[in-house]
Image (cartoon, helix red, strand yellow):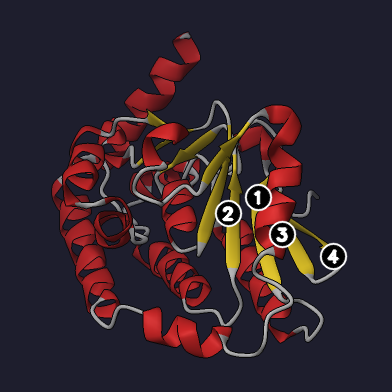
Amino acid sequence: MTTAVLTEQTGAVRRIRLNRPESRNSIDPDLIESLDAAVADAMRDPDTEAVVISGNGPSFCAGADLRHLLELARTGGDPLAFLGTVSACFTRLEVAPKPVIAAVHGHVVAGGLELALACDAVVARAGTVIGDGHIRNGLLPGAGSSVRLPRKVGEPLARRLVLTGELLPAEHFVPSGFVQVVAEDEEFEATVTTVARSFTGLPPGQAWLKQLLADPGVPEALLQELEVFAEHWREQDIAAKLTHFFDQRAVR
C-alpha cells in the first residue's frame, strides 16, 4: 500500500510530499489524515523551523478525489464530514505556529488551491496552472476557496476564478503576492530551499505573529461555505455530473 504522504528533514526544514501521483495527489480521507498528522508532527518537532508542502508526480494537487465523491453521491451519502475534515486540516495549517511554504507544480486546482491558500508562501514551477475549478464539475468550494481566495488575490480575480473555473498560469498570481516567485525547472528546488530557509534562523516570535495575522472572520465564513455546499449538494444531481466528467475523460 502506497504511503499517502512522505516526509524528509533537511536542516531546519521539514518537507512533506503528497504521494498519490497516479491521481495527481487528489485528496481522499487517507491523504488528508496523513497530511494532518505530518503537519502536527512537524509543529511539535523543536528542530523544525519551517515546513514545505509539495506533491510527487505530475501535479501538486488536483483537488478532491472525485471518485470518492461519486461513490458517496451514488449511495445517497454526502461528503460533508469529509470536507469538514479537509477544511479543519487547512485551518490548522493556516494558524500553525511555524511558517508553511507550498512548493507547487503542474495543476493546483480546487482542493489543491485551497491547500496552497492556507500556506504562508507559495513558490511555483514554470508551467504551473492555478484555479478553483469546482464549478466545471458542478461542485462548490468546501475547504476555504470562497473565503481565502479573495483575501489572497483580491476580490475581482477571485470572482473570475470561482465563477468560471478558469485555470491561469502561475505568473498571473505574482502581482497579488499569492505566488511569491515562479522558477524554471532547473532552478525550482533551489528556489524552494532558499525561500524556506528565509523563514528559519530567526528569534522567537513567529507563532505570535501568525496569531496576529489570523483573520477572526474566517471560522464563521468557512462554516457558511460548508452550509452552502450542503444545500447545493442536496439540490443537484451530483452523481450525474461526476459520471459525465469521467465519461468524457474516458473518451479522450
Specify which label sits upstream in the sequence, 2 or 3: 3
Q: Which mark is residue 16?
A: 3
- The amino acid beneath tag 3 is Ile
Q: For marks 2 and 3, give the CA distance.
A: 10 Å
For the point 61% across and 78% down, which residue is it? 98
Nearer-the-camera pick, 133 or 78? 133
Kindly indicate whether the residue at mark 4 contacts the one at mark 2 (C-beta within 8 angstroms): no
- The amino acid beneath tag 1 is Ser
Kindly indicate whether the residue at mark 2 contacts the one at mark 1 (C-beta within 8 angstroms): yes
In the picture of the structure, the residue carrying the numbered disc 4 is 9
* Mark whose residue sits in front, 2 or 3: 2
For the point 54% across and 43% down, which residue is it? 181
For the point 25% across and 48% down, which residue is it? 140
Kindly indicate whether the residue at mark 1 contacts the one at mark 4 (C-beta within 8 angstroms): no
In the picture of the structure, the residue carrying the numbered disc 2 is 102
- The amino acid beneath tag 2 is Ala
Corner quadrant of residue 247:
top left
Corner quadrant of residue 70:
top left
For the point 31% across and 61% down, which residue is it? 148
Q: For marks 2 and 4, give the CA distance.
A: 16 Å
Q: For marks 4 and 3, give the CA distance.
A: 9 Å
Specify which label sits upstream in the sequence, 1 or 3: 3
- Circle 2: element type: strand
